[in-house]
Image: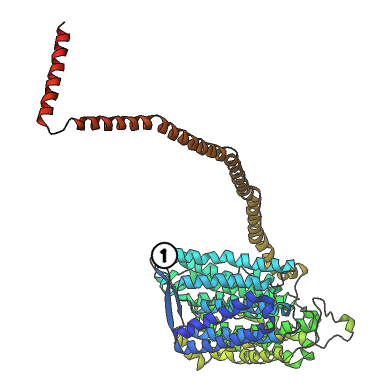
Amino acid sequence: MTGLLWTAVALPAVVGALLAVLGRRADRVALPAGVTAAAGVLGLAVAVALGRPATAVPFLPAASFGLAVDALAAVVLPAVAAVALLVLVFAAGDAGAPFQRARARFTGLMLLFLAAVVVTVTASTLPALLVAWEVMGATSYALIGFRWQEEHRVGAGLTAFLTTRTADLGLYLAAGAALAGGAGLGLDDLAAADGPWLHVAAAGMLVAALGKAAQLPFTAWLSAAMQGPSPVSALLHSAAMVAMGGYLLLRMEPLLAATGWAGPTAAWVGALTALLLGAVAIAQRDLKQLLAASTAAQLGFVVLGAGVGSVAGGTAHLVAHAATKALLFLVAGAWLTALGTKQLTALRGAARRWPLVGVGAGIGALALAGVVPLSLWATKDEVLAGAREESLPLYLVGLAAAALSAGYAGKVLWLVWRPAPADPADDGLDTEEEGTRRVGGLQQAPLVVLAAGAAVLGLLALPPVGEALRRALGDTAAPTASWAEMAISALLAAVGVVVSGRKWPFSPSLRGWLAGWLGLARATDVLVVRPVLRAAELCARFDDRVLAPAVAGTARSALHTAGALGRFDDGALAPATTGTGRSTLRLAGATGRADLAGPDRLVRAAAAGTRRLGGLARRAQTGLLHQYYVQATVALAAALALLLLAGR
């Protein structure tokens, strides 16, 4: 079973990497290959959800790369894989979309992103989570700025990347605190960290998760991220990247609860995000901007659930929202390709042009509003029940946010189902790109599946499925919504949808503030993006003016020195060495000749004289006694003569 888990990670990673590397050479097979790989991941996700494997391999000293499928991952992983598959099927049918001009790169990045999300969902140790978190951030940047030829889209991707990266530093802080506190790097072990390190780890996790989930004050990057292709928005902002922030807080709920302050902080941040971003969504005139703001608002309910300990309610809301929001983003993408716009006023009557798409949009909007019996009605109330148990003001803020969700969802519903303008000159179409005026079958098929999910996934919060989910997640002690509370929220949703067709009483300044995402977009630009870009510019300038010239100067000096040494060698050392060699040879020849003419000749002459003397000496040795007597007499006479001469 662990092999299936590794395969669920490796399959999209390998296929995605191949497509991204091959580029245009793989364009023709890219989308079929992507759909096949995503289908394989869905099958593997279902298999491991049933088998619940766990595995780990050595990765760092005293830290392993661990993956495990527990009850929470078993619920979320198939949902992520299913949304990814449906998004890629939609993309295969979206023939008129600009990303079709680079299908291999698009599909490859989507699959790499999916692989990172699979690891994020199943990570059981901080090293595995950090690796997946980094890959997820890098691929999301590439997907949001996919049309890199257009500067504003690259800038949008950069804003999203820098904002989330700033918050992601919290994960490294949490890892450091876990090591310092002696808890180890297992995610389930963080709640056992000692003393102040427990609070540092919780703070790091909280910041990282809030940044990824686009919660206050990290919300504005989600607005910029809408520059990405619609299928990218459908995957990243429904079931994957943004949802992973909420998912991380659900997984780390024991850590939040152990601190005594992190849980309430998360709960209030989630509730306020749901309320304020709900108002922001109402003020939007662009459909994707409205959906982006509503994504942050709906993830606020997930964060609220994690903060009050309603893990089952938060999980049910996460999964139901994934289907609902993927549906609405794909509807927005279908209309953008067909009509060339995503401005709400220009989408009047769009639901009537393609009834199946319109019905899907209607189901998605009503589910988002919390209308009975669609999915987000029950899941939202399950979260609010936990908030009511924690604090009445917290519950009331959450309830007001739920009412606002009916307002922005109803706004979409009323506009797209209104009759189209009678005068074609006033239709406002083709303002953003050239529309194709068609929505293909492959685009519509995923909408049917997602609409079914948006309709029925509320069962995750209702008996008996809800009870089974609570037992599986060990969340049986959390409070559940009473029928009276569910009736109140249902009434608010119905009233909100009805009145949303009216003009909201916003003053121009208030509408401008809300339409500008509470000024957070500008604040993010001033506080995060510009300082980072300025620092990068200074580093680049330092590199250009100091480091690069120093390196180039060193290289040039080395070349000059080498040239001078070469010339010195050629002009001085080599001739000197050659001359010395030649002189040595001549001296050796002269010495040899002198030796032959002088000492050698003398030695030879001495040897010859010695040999002749030896010959003369051998002549006296005759062996005859009388001759020896004569020789002795002669010798004595000679000696006597010498004595006499010496005596005179």
Q: Which sits in the foreground, 39 or 239?
A: 39
Residue 46: x and y in percent read: 52, 89
Q: Which sits in the foreground, 376 or 167?
A: 167
Residue 36: x and y in percent read: 61, 87
Residue 479: x and y in percent read: 48, 84
Residue 479, visible in the rendered structure: no
Residue 439 is left or right of residue 125, and the answer is: right
Residue picked out by circle 1 = 179
Q: Quadrant of residue 563?
A: top right
Residue 118 is left or right of residue 617, and the answer is: right
Q: How many marks?
A: 1
Q: Secondary structure at mark 1?
A: helix
**Residue displayed at 74% across by 84% down:** 95
When the figure is inspected, residue 359 is found, relative to residue 14, above or below; the finding is: below
**Residue displayed at 12% across by 32% down:** 624
- Which quadrant is the C terminus positioned in? top left
Q: Residue pushed farthest top?
A: 648
